[in-house]
Amino acid sequence: MTYCVALKLNTGLVFASDSRTNAGVDQVASFKKMRSFVRPGDRAMVILSSGNLSITQSAVNLLEQRGRHADKSNIWNAESMFDVAMLLGECMREVRDRDGPFLLQSSVDIGANFILGGQIKDEAPRLFLVYAEGNFIEATEATPFFQIGETKYGKPIIDRVIQAGTSLMDAIKCVLVSFDSTMRSNISVGMPIDLACYSTDSLSLDRVYKIGQGDPYFTSISQRWSEGLRGVFASLPDPDWGCPTTDTHSTPPP
């Protein structure tokens, strides 16, 4: 399993993905699930992936390979992020059509999803969720984030904190808390965490980080979040309808 999240804010985009791939209790490995495509001053794009590793790797590699053919529509000459999402969806369909029947013969799950985000010169930053079937949806101001993989544990903090007007720094902290919550509850998600932060109109991807086991900042965030939650919980008022602290039921005589 995996966990990936991307946020679309007024000031930019934040992307994060874990690196754990689990094919059974004795087949745990690390694979990078973030791929970036950058031509400074023209475009900067990031792709996050979850699901069948062979499907996602093949689809992204096919997208990259087609970028070498200038005579055809590709990631480097596409005029909008919408066009790039179309290209990625087409690559997904081609790989599934090619490999899917053979994988299904062995009952292998071919499900896979992508998050694609970035900016191409002369348009605003955009963020898309690309489904296994190759179709996609776009993030809006009302729903400014996407998650794929093991999403349920990290979603509550994002729901409570993230809005379009959230600062990039607060968004990064929120994403890291989201990962901490997920890793505490699901062993199929694990470090290292790849994190990328894109500032609107920079058309470059300068802030890219890898957060490994024992990272001082992540450890501090994790500890302070846990302490803060316990403190807030302890300060919550008791319900006014009360609750008996001892058993008040009488015991019938023998």
Image: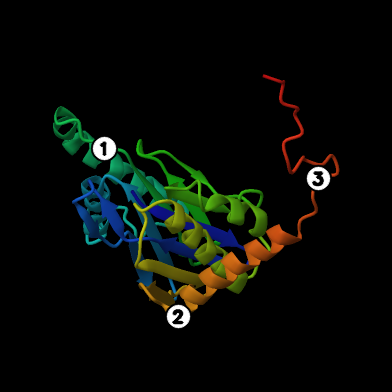
Q: CA distance from mark 3 to mark 1?
A: 48 Å
**Mark linked to residue 216:** 2
Q: Is residue 230 left or right of residue 129?
A: right
- The three-letter code of the residue at mark 3 reads Pro
Q: Give the residue drawn at x 13%, y 32%.
A: 102
Between 23 and 53, the one nearer to me in the picture: 23
Q: Give the residue drawn at x 61%, y 68%.
A: 227
3 or 2: mark nearer the eye: 3
Does residue 248 lie above or below 236 as drawn? above
Q: Quadrant of residue 103?
A: top left
- Could you classify mark 1 by the number of other residues whose Cα lies within 10 Å: few (under 14), some (14-19), or many (20 or more)? some
Between 32 and 30, the one nearer to me in the picture: 30
Q: Are marks 2 and 1 in contact (CB under 8 Å)?
A: no
- Confirm whether residue 11 shows in the render: no
Secondary structure beneath disc 1? loop
- The three-letter code of the residue at mark 2 reads Pro
- Residue, disc 3: 239
Give the percent coordinates (x, y) of residue 189. Answer: 37, 55
2 or 1: mark nearer the eye: 2
Q: Are marks 3 and 2 in contact (CB under 8 Å)?
A: no
- The three-letter code of the residue at mark 1 reads Ile
Quarter in which the C terminus is drawn:
top right
- Could you classify mark 3 by the number of other residues whose Cα lies within 10 Å: few (under 14), some (14-19), or many (20 or more)? few
Q: Is residue 246 left or right of residue 136?
A: right
- Residue, disc 1: 110
Q: Give the residue drawn at x 39%, y 46%.
A: 86
Does residue 67 lie above or below 90 as drawn? below
